[in-house]
Image (cartoon, rainbow, N blue to C red):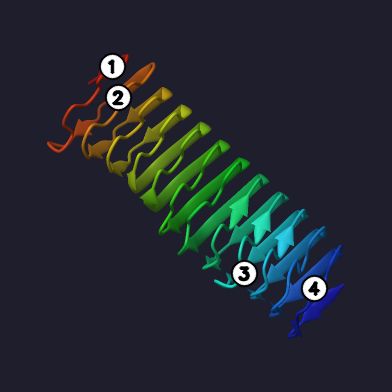
Amino acid sequence: MKISDQYVDGERPLYASRDLQLSRVTIGEGESGLKESRRIEAVDCEFEGMYVIWECEDVECRNCHFAESDRAPLWYDRNLRLYDCLIDAPKAFREIDGLRLERIKITNGAETFWYCRNGQISEFKMENGMYAFMRANQLQISNIRLQGKYIFQYAKNIEIHNAILDTKDAFWEAENVTVYDSEIKGEYLGWYSKNLRLVRCRIFGTQPLCYCQNLILEDCILDDSCDRAFEKSGYSLIP
């Protein structure tokens, strides 16, 4: 079924839809606009109501806007793909299994990507990312810029390329994380992490990389601001 150039609102206006194509559709005030839906394609759409895409499967959004009023829009989904989207909604992603994001901007990244797993993220920008990526697992991430605090805490099996991370307490208690060719700014980087590997990275900020297990730094540069680094850490430095 195809729906074009329409405004829908209220409680669950498109609940449990199947094989639905949305074009220039606004899902307005209300809750759970597409909850429990399958095989959804949305192009040039506006999402304003809360909890719009929950418990859905095989969803693709292109050039869509998730408004600030669309609180917690994308939770408990499977096989979710977003391209060229702007997300102003808080707590945007939670418990997603199978995630692909390209050319996405998130302006309020607080508590976003908690427990998300099995995903690929590229050409991505996040602002205000307080506690983003908490307990995320099995993510491939490239060409990103993240700003916030406490990012990737308790995350596991993460690989990151070409990133700028401006964050306090990144990778706290993270496990099996590798970061390549990136710039990392902030305090208390990687404390209590296990198997954290940094390759060709530049690191800024006080007291980084303490209490780490099996830490590897390969061809990295630590700025003069990195005082009291490596306290009680087991680490290897590879030139």
Secondary structure at badge 2 equals loop
Could you give the CA–CA distance between mark 1 and mark 3, rounded to whole angstroms? 44 Å
104 left or right, relative to 227: right
Name which residue type carries label 4: Glu
> How dense is the environment of label 3, judged by Cα within 10 Å: few (below 14), some, or many (20 and up)?
many
Q: Residues within 10 Å of mark 2 (few under 14, many from 20)?
A: many
Kindly report the distance in space between the C-alpha atoms of the residues bearing marks 3 and 2. Answer: 39 Å
Upstream in sequence: badge 1 or badge 3: 3
Which callout, 4 or 2, points at the residue further toward the start of the chain?
4
The disc label shown at residue 232, or none: 1
> Decide: marks 1, 4 in contact (CB < 8 A)?
no
Give the vertical position of 4 relative to 155 (above or below): below
Of residues 186 and 196, which is closer to you in this image? 186
Left or right: residue 116 compared with residue 27: left
Q: CA gap, disc 4 to disc 2?
A: 49 Å
Residue at coordinates 47% horizontally, 35% vertically from top-left?
159
Earlier-in-chain disc, 3 versus 2: 3
Q: At numbered mark 3, what does the secondary structure look like: helix, strand or loop? A: loop
* Residue designated by label 2: 210
Residue at which label 4 appears:
11
Determine which quarter of the picture holds residue 221.
top left
Q: Position of residue 4 (x, y in %)?
A: 76, 82
Q: Earlier in the sequence, mark 4 or mark 3?
A: 4
Q: Tell me the residue that label 3 is attached to.
A: 70
